[in-house]
Image (cartoon, rainbow, N blue to C red):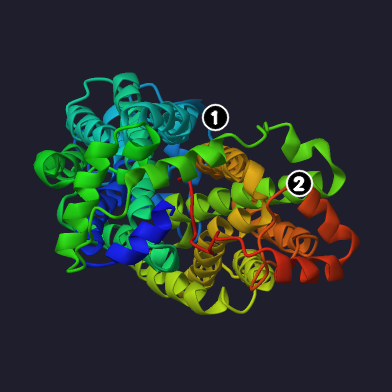
Amino acid sequence: MNFDEILSKIGGFGKFQKLLYVWICLPQIFLAFHMLVSVFTGAVPPHLCRSAWPSVGTPANFSHLSGPGGLPELSCSTALNLSGSAAPGDGQPAASCQDGWEYSRETFQSTIVTEWDLVCSNAGLNNLGSSIYMSGLLVGAPVFGHLADKYGRRIIILVSLAIQAIFGVAAAFAPHFYIYIALRFMVGMSISGVIMNAFVLGTEWTGPKQRMLAGIITDYFFGFGYIILAGLAYLIRDWRKLQLAISAPGFIFIIYIWVLPKSARWLMANDRNAEAWELILKAAEMNGKPISKDLEICQVQQTEEKTVLKKKHSFVDLIRTPTMRKHSLIVFYLWFVNVLVYYSLSLNISDFGMNIFLTQMIFGLVEMPARTITLFTLNRSRKFSQLAFLAVGGSACLLTTCIPSDLPIVRTVLAMIGKFGITASLSIIYVYSAEVFPTVIRQNGIGIGSMCARIGGVLAPMTYLLRNIHPHAPMVLSGLCPLLGAGLTLLLPETVNKPLPDTIEDVEGQSISDEEQCVKTAIFDPRITNDGSRTV
């Protein structure tokens, strides 16, 4: 008897698991805060050189920076020998700002940009800071993943939540930009520790049939955080106070020391069977399905040991054979492009010309139907669901480049459709990739895919710099990359209602004959369900 069979006896998603998911979902709200707060703390208000205006004490007129006949060059330069009667930019020689900048306070009281003058020649530092934060997620994944395998999911979740709160609060008091991004890097690392291990803890306690639905529930709470952040940023226009507001409440998770359970599956895998059995009995009692000692824990242990004794495989096996290599490279690209475009759209919402707070809320609302629709489409086709949502997301992003800037509502609607497609596609790739890789290298494949996703996250803030080449360059990239992914998806196999491959030979056999796979259906009955298992 394996652990999934025990879960079926004690309840795969009873009161115990539902309470567990309450504890797992609440931090997701704060994860959304930290992932997206740079949209507001790193916002760039209208600005111009202090020396661009001759009259001391005269308020800067930011209307000269935009609109008909606007002079956006005054943001980074000032005319030499500007007389009081001359209009700004009347063909006079220009020089770089020597006396700093004046910033509009119409939308934000302060941001990291206004505090540390991250404009003009220093503008790239703002995007670099976001990329360094994303690098924290990249580093945190293997670090906290390894520690969780060694010391357990629960303790690493607790440590990660503590790091997130401590360094998040410290970032609100950072005296220098480089200290700020170092603290944000640590927050990014902690985010990986929470996301990855909270999801694993949840799936290890949840029955196979309920895992996909349970995973979508956690995504909803991330969407709630997306929307709540828009309201907080609207009410708190000072970046330090906003950073403090999203970080300080994290200390309430100290109660998790007493309420968050350990993983019984992990305990058994590490020969701590007495602790595991105690938790199983507690879960069974809470679910109203008490069990007897007749379910010997050693049976579970023996089943797990049999799995470990199988032939070992490495990352090299992902590209050793032709069909496996093709599938692996395509899936890795899909992971990369989904996260690249998701965060390119999420972090650059100021480009669409509408109110930044309203756009943030709309983008958060889009998360809900996008996550929900996948519950219905996945049961029909993994392959064409992935293809269709990538095509929708990419096409909508490309269409935004055809809309003039004086139609911000139309551009925002198209961007919203693009966000809808990419969000749905991102939800699907978790499930689809788990089914494309065979059992013997599934974890390796998902692990590499997750690393590719994080590389996309690191590069996403830097796509904003492509505007220096052409104003539409970021959206062109966000459109073409998903469309390429949609085309490549045609080369992947359909996995819905089909037995999952156990070995690399199974994958190579699929490319030779679909009929052979139909024969296997009558022989094999893999107990690996479409549960959406993932690494974030």
Q: Which residue is identified by label 1? A: 93
Quarter of the picture containing the C terminus is top left
Of residues 270 and 90, the one drawn nearer to the viewer in this rendering:
270
Quarter of the picture containing the N terminus is bottom left
Percent x, y of residue 327:
75, 51
Residue 203 position (above or below residue 530): above
Percent x, y of residue 116:
31, 27
Q: Is residue 491 left or right of residue 482?
A: right
Of residues 470 and 140, the one drawn nearer to the viewer in this rendering:
140
* Residue positioned most to the right: 512
Camera-side mark, 2 or 1: 2
Q: Which residue is identified by label 2? A: 504
Query: Total of numbered circles in the picture?
Result: 2
- Which residue sits at x=48%, y=33%? 138
- What kind of element bears circle 2? helix
- What kind of element bears circle 1? loop
* Residue positioned most to the front: 294
